[in-house]
Amino acid sequence: MRIQVASENSFIIYFNDVIAASTSAQIGACTAYLRQSMGPVLVDLVPSYASLLVIYHQHLADHYAVKQMLRAAIEQVADESVSEGKLVHLPVYYSEESGPDLAMMAQRANLSIEATIDLHQSMAYQVYAIGFAPGFAYLGEVDKRLAAPRIATPRLKVPKGAVAIADRQTAVYPSQSPGGWNLIGLCPTPMFNPAEQPPMPVNVGDQIKFEAISRAEFLQQGGDEQLLLEPIV
């Protein structure tokens, strides 16, 4: 692990040169430690695949003091056996009405739609990074049979809760936004709510396992029926 200056009020900690579940677990543990230990000095923490950006208040601590805090966090993570994060189960209504690219994905993989759904929900995915939008968790890696490039023309409106695949990553859109990932279903579980603590159900280092639900279950669990009545194009 190494610490480098990122700006006048931020450092970046590099944990590894490769992406791995163990690296993700270390980043998650270090993030939790710094969030607790830095107190009001901390502005924000931005975890990524193999690094952690630490932004701090310049008027509360100087460069040297913050670097000492980061070294203490690294030593803590290095000295302790880092356990895997929590396993979070997310329901998904997989269908052609909720996932307009599902049939195309199945055809690409030379699988039936049912087999494609089973393959996507058959494994737990590591939360490697959170970015693009608050609550957007980059998960990996999907089975290589489901790997697919982003669509040629990104959609202007991808609905909140859309479950998607791009390359060997999968994700749930936390809010309506433009996007170019392949859409295969809808998840009724909110991925970001600033009014709640914590605001996100997952953190870097956690794992997510998707579980297929029916249309009726999607609606019972808070899914928006309007998303099913207005086809995603």
Image: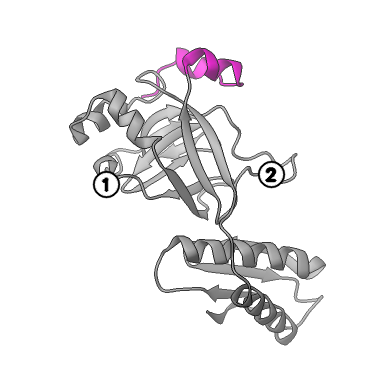
Question: In front here: 152 or 203?
Answer: 203
Q: Quadrant of residue 123?
A: top left
> Is 52 located above or below residue 227 in the figure?
below
Question: Horizontal and vertical percent for residue 135?
Answer: 58, 45
> Is 157 located above or below residue 29 in the figure?
above
Q: How many discs mark residues in the rendered view?
A: 2
Question: Horizontal and vertical percent for residue 165?
Answer: 36, 40
Q: Using the image, tell me which numbered label, if any, was put on residue 144.
A: 1
In the picture of the structure, the residue carrying the numbered disc 2 is 199
Q: Residue at x 56, y 21 (%)?
A: 223
- Other residues around mark 2 within 10 Å, as few (<14) / some (14–19) / many (≥20): some
> Is 207 located above or below residue 216 in the figure?
below
User: Residue 77: within the magenta?
Assistant: no
Chain-order first, disc 1 or disc 2: 1
Q: Is residue 61 something that shows in the picture?
A: yes
- What's the amino acid at mark 2? Pro
Q: Tell me the distance, in whole angstroms, between the alpha carbons under discs 1 and 2.
A: 32 Å
Q: Residue at x 60, y 46 (%)?
A: 202
Q: Is residue 199 left or right of residue 100?
A: right
Q: Residue at x 54, y 62 (%)?
A: 25
Question: Horizontal and vertical percent for residue 166?
Answer: 34, 44
Question: In front here: 180 or 145?
Answer: 145
